Amino acid sequence: MSDFSYHTALGEGVKLYTDAMRHFVREKLIARYPNNWFERGVLQHLQETQRKLLKQELDKKALSPADYLHLMEPVHFRQVIGKEFDHAFAGVWTDFKQTQAYLNQAVTARNEWAHPRTGDMLADDAAEGLRAMHKLLERTGRAEAAQVEALWKKVNGVADDAPAKPLVVPEAQPAPSPAPAGQLPYWWQLTEPWEGFQNPAKIDESLFAASLGGVAAGTARDEYLNPVRFFEHTYFTEQLRQTVNDVISRMHGGDGASVTEMQTPFGGGKTHALLTLYHLVKSPDKAMSVPGVKEALGEVVVPAGARIAVVDGSEMGTDALLKEDGTSVSTLWGEIAYQLDPKAYRQHVQPSDDRGEKPGNAAYREVLKVASPCLILIDELISYLVGLKFSNARRTQNLYRQTVQFLQEFLQEAGNIPGVCVLLTLPQSRQEFGGIDPGQLQQELGIVEEIKPRADRVVSKRMPVADTEVYTLISRRLFKPADPAAVNRTVDAYYESYNKGREQALYDPTVYTTDFRRQMVDAFPFHPELIDVLYKKWGAQADFPRTRTVLQLLANVVADQWQIKPPAHAIHSKHVNLERERIRTKVLSAMGSAANDSVVAADIIGGDAHADALDERRGGDYQHHKVARGVATTVLLHSAGGRSGQNGAMPSDIRLGSVSPLLGPEYTDEVLGSIEETCYYIHREGQMLRFQTKQNLYRRIAETANNQPQHVIDDRIRTAIADAYGSSQGFKVLQWAGADGSITDQPEPSIAILAATTKLRVQDDTGQPSASDRKIIEELWNRVGGGFRQWRNALVLIGADRDLWERAEQALREVLAYELILDQKSKDADTLSPQERKDLDARLREKRASLKTSLVTAYRWLFYPDGDGELPAIALPTATAGDTIAKRAIERLESHDYGNPKVLRHMSAMFFDAKFSPRVWDKDTELDIAELSRRFPQWTYLPILPDRDQTLRSCIREGIKDGLWSVVYGDKSTTTYRRLIEKPVDLDALPELFDSASFLVRGDLRELIRQELGSAEPSPIPSAGEPGAVISTTTTTGSGSSHAGGTPSPAPVPAVAKRYARVRLTVSELPVVKSQNLQPYLWKALQEADPGTRLSLSIDVSSDAGIPEDVLERRIREGFEQLGINVDWEVS
């Protein structure tokens, strides 16, 4: 079977079954009727209509007796085996009622296969038919039994091979690791599923296919057939306990309702409530012996001799039912009466049953009196009525009208006979009605209070499962109990996370109620959000599937998560693994038109799914926890069902489906900001997100973006980048520099933002630009025109990274696409709703801002001249909003976080004296200040001074103040000095410092000049613009007063502070909350004393709670490595 489907599997099973049974039936009938097996063994036992049809076939085809077997169909096997059960087939099957039930199921399966619905059939229906056929063949000894069994296992999901070819192969999962010691344990460390729900490949979905008729006939699984096993897995809700008490009270002649219509939250699950009553009344001693039943129900006593009748509409057909004593029953009233009392049936009901006309009330009242106390259970009634209503046979259509009339009178009459109790189930959705409008049938059955006021007095509506009990019911059905204390600790951890978002209103206010907390405890290990999606949203759609489908889905989710054992404290919507074919199929069947396989494959699962791509781009925890995939899965589940306009997820819904003690809301919110741009089929309306089968607006934008010609991008990007260049004080910004192969040579500090015609490729082994690209950059820096660059220390260059530039081009394509779609002249503009246009306008503004940031980020490679005359490259980090290319490049060169900065806007005298003085100043000579200024833009071992003159003047002034040097004014070539400046205030009065007439002097030379000028007449300081002005020398006493005449006393020289090359500082028991004080009192002080100071830190950390390993590795060690700082840690 290359293209597997449930319908195909059932069809193959029907063929195997039919062929095997033809040969087996013929073999047994020949043994009893050697000469005329077909006439006496087959035709004689068929109904008149069937007999006529077969005779017509015999006449038409002129078959030989050897070929008669090919005329038999499953419907004939039921009649033949029933009539010959104790004769030709004696000893083959031992239980008549059970065998007839299996034969009926086989007939139903054949009919469903022959008249299929649109799309594939339900797995439950196929599995039920295949199981019945296997049970029948198993007793025959035919080889086909094993083949049919294999098909049943495949459909039921317990075969060795998968039931369908999946869209993707689920990823191999790493070996599960429990939560670190001392931390909150994961859910799978606190509880485990029941054995049947632990292996995804071995989930037997028929566990949830309870059938009241199957139990009554003995064909059901032992879990439902055996009352002890049934009650071992039954959770008694408050409403179910009350229903049991009411039924038993009524059967004792008490005040309980005579007729009860069972309703349940999921539009299904009513059958389980009926089975509870069936086993309790049928086997009270066994039921009450199961631990927990007596505690739940109290001293319930079933009346002695109580009788029970079971009608399963899905098991009844339009043909007569053959009983073990040979009686034939063909109506609903006949079936109920026969089960209650065969004798009363023959006496009061059989004639009307034969005619297909409802019995009189008096006659049926006699049956009920004889049977009292009795319990009458009617399940799947609509399945039976639909078969009658849409039959082509006139008699059957009349039987439909008679049956509806009988039900109206019967339900009312039951209230008049003490001890008679009727429970029936009616579906709540169009799907369960077989496509008939529920309101129409409710009216015809006379149980709607607006139609039949008397029925309102007779029929009681009961919901065995209250809304608040759904969480406990589902949890206990699939999981073993967990330690309550551990569960509460987990819930506490969730609330610690929820409370952090309370002020920001990140969650629905109901999250903070005691009811929701109780739901979290009751639902564990499920998160109540997942159950609410299925209950409140899926349950609101008109064709919501039965409870068994929901439980089958959850069972598969549980087995999948149990096998994976993810780092999770509860099972959320995000954990519904759509890579599992059986999970995906059930989800999509509930989605209806909201999604299909192609939608899920494109956006959520598979190697190239869009949500996974978003996680990979973000990396880290996003990729580890598959945040975007979880968000998309949650949106998908919320997109099914709900009232019009409400099928979808609000941000608060998605946070509940994603946030946990391990993952804060910031991760979810980050993804929510761009999820519909990433996933093609997620649509946004305001804040509501939902899946649809049509591509969203952003997919159209993406296609428009990708269709933009390259020449349009090249032209527009030159305009867009103008806003990204920026500026930096003291630097001349050279825009799109080097496009002609040269950059201007000038002493003013310049930053050359290179034209993107030169885009740098990263060399994999070094992480630096490739050698060929570096050569281009170095050529621009070294040479200008035909010669070498003179002002090599005045130029820094910044070039674009090839990959990042391509991203920036893509960002520009998106901007152009938004503009084109919003253009009133475009065809797309007319299709936009006002809300879509508003959203797109806002997004366009964001995209334009993002484009600028992308362009700034693209200029990643910063080249600057270093002390060795080389041109190293710095990789700049990702830009942030507000950054410009020039600004962040110069800020990086100014930063003290990476050692000695290349750009200085302030240079202390001590720093200059320690770092540069030895290389630019011979201690025995004067230092020409003008020449010093010229050396800064030339010599690469010096820093770049954006405001060179002012920075040098401030540095010199500070040196004079600290006594490191003085300034002498004069002519060095003739050693004619006119003035020695030893006070900052006198330097301030000097209008020109860089005129080649000012020199720095120190040491013995300064002392010599001081002595020489001491006897000179003081000269006035020349004012600005006075050429040849003579500068006088002023000497001071210790008190600073001037002395006219006499010998002046030398100015006192301040003592130079003692300096230490190595210092060890010890700060003990520093609370981490006060560590911020290290910045002003330690780091800043050391930095100001010497920016080149190097530190070796050894930090002993003590923490009662413990420091997580990922904090040490990811946030601390990796963070420092990005700054070029090595950090090691060890546990002490």
Image: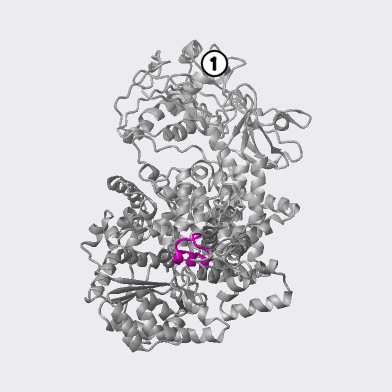
Relative to residue 246, is residue 790 drawn left or right? right
| Residue located beneath label 1 in the image | 918
Q: Is residue 394 above or below residue 252?
A: below
Q: Nearer the viewer, residue 116 or 655?
A: 116
Find residue 706 and report its horizontal and vertical position in percent: 69, 55
Rendered image quadrant of residue 283: bottom left
Relative to residue 394, is residue 241 drawn left or right? left
Q: Is residue 646 above or below residue 786?
A: below
Name the quarter where the C terminus is drawn.
Answer: top left
Find residue 855 and report its horizontal and vertical position in percent: 62, 46
| Residue 82 visible in the snapshot | yes
Would residue 102 be counted in the magenta stretch?
Answer: yes
Q: Residue at x 40, y 56 (%)?
A: 223
State the scheme by which the image is colored.
one colour
Q: Nearer the viewer, residue 332 or 542?
A: 332
Q: Is residue 832 above or below residue 178?
A: below
Q: Is residue 421 above or below residue 468?
A: below
Please give the range of residues in magenta: 89-105
Would residue 362 be counted in the magenta stretch?
Answer: no
Rendered image quadrant of residue 224: bottom left
Q: Residue furthest right?
A: 786
Q: Residue at x 67, y 46 (%)?
A: 806
Q: What amino acid is labelled 1 in the image?
A: Pro
Q: Nearer the viewer, residue 623 or 160?
A: 160
Q: Residue furthest front?
A: 35
